C-alpha cells in the first residue's frame, strides 16, 4: 500500500453495529413511535391489569417488551451475523485520491466520488458508500485522530460535490 494520510485496521463488533442501529432508530420518527407505543402499552396495562384475563396480560407484557427488549435483541443477533462476515484482517487507508481497502482475499479502491456522506455519532464516525451501507470507525479505532480524520473526509466530500456542480 502506498503512503496513506490515515491508515486503520478495520475493527467492528456486533455491539458497534447494534449501537449504530439503535442510534438510527431512536433519532428518527420511528424511535418516537416506539417510545409512544411502549408508554401507551404501560399505561393500558397499569389501568386494566386487574380486569383482564391471562391472555390479555400476556399481550400487555409482549407490547411493553417489544421495543425496549425484543427489538434490540433481534437487532443484536442480526448485527452478530453481519460482524462475523467482516474479514478480521481488513485494513483501510485514506489519501487525497481515495480509500484503499485491503484484506488477505482482496484489494480495492474507492474514489472520493463514491462516498455518499459521513455521519459523526457520539462514539463513532460512519462513512457511507450508499444510503444504507458504509464503514463504521469507532473511537477505539480512530483514537486521537477522530476530529482530524472527520475534517479530512468532509473536505474530500465537499471537494467532490463542488466538482460535480
Image (tube, rainbow, N blue to C red):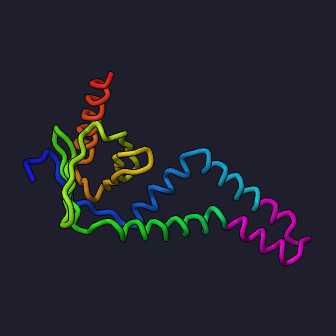
Magenta stretch: dominant secondary structure: helix
Q: Quadrant of the C terminus?
A: top left
The residue sitting at the top extreme is: 165
The residue sitting at the right extreme is: 51
Identify the residue at image location x=25%, y=33%.
155
Identify the residue at image location x=84%, y=78%.
54
Identify the residue at image location x=37%, y=53%.
123
Q: Is residue 21 above or below residue 80?
A: above
Q: Quadrant of residue 16?
A: bottom left
* Relative side of 3 to 73, left or right: left
Residue 50 screen position, x and y as percent: 88, 72
* Relative side of 62 to 105, left or right: right
Identify which residue, 24 or 98, lies in the foreground.
98
Residue 110 screen position, x and y as percent: 24, 45
Residue 12 within the segment the image draws in magenta: no
Q: Which residues are magenta?
A: 42-65
Identify which residue, 30 or 141, lies in the foreground.
30
Residue 53 screen position, x and y as percent: 89, 76
* Relative side of 165 to 53, left or right: left
The residue sitting at the bottom extreme is: 54
Identify the residue at image location x=73%, y=65%.
63
* Relative side of 1 to 129, left or right: left
Q: Quadrant of residue 17?
A: bottom left
Q: Is residue 61 above or below residue 126?
A: below
Q: Is residue 161 above or below residue 14?
A: above
Amino acid at each position: 500500500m502506498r503512503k496513506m494520510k490515515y491508515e486503520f485496521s478495520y475493527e467492528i463488533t456486533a455491539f458497534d453495529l447494534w449501537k449504530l442501529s439503535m442510534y438510527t432508530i431512536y433519532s428518527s420518527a420511528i424511535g418516537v413511535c416506539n417510545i409512544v407505543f411502549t408508554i401507551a402499552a404501560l399505561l393500558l396495562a397499569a389501568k386494566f391489569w386487574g380486569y383482564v384475563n391471562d391472555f390479555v396480560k400476556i399481550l400487555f407484557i409482549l407490547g411493553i417488551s417489544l421495543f425496549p427488549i425484543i427489538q434490540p435483541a433481534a437487532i443484536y443477533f442480526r448485527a452478530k451475523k453481519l460482524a462475523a462476515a467482516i474479514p478480521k484482517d481488513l485494513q483501510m487507508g485514506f489519501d487525497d485520491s481515495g480509500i484503499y481497502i485491503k484484506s488477505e482475499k482482496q484489494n480495492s479502491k474507492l474514489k472520493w466520488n463514491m462516498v455518499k456522506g459521513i455521519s459523526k455519532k457520539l462514539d463513532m464516525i460512519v462513512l457511507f458508500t450508499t444510503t444504507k451501507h458504509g464503514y463504521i470507525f469507532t473511537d477505539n479505532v480512530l483514537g486521537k485522530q477522530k476530529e482530524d480524520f472527520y475534517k479530512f473526509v468532509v473536505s474530500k466530500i465537499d471537494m467532490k460535490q463542488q466538482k460535480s456542480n
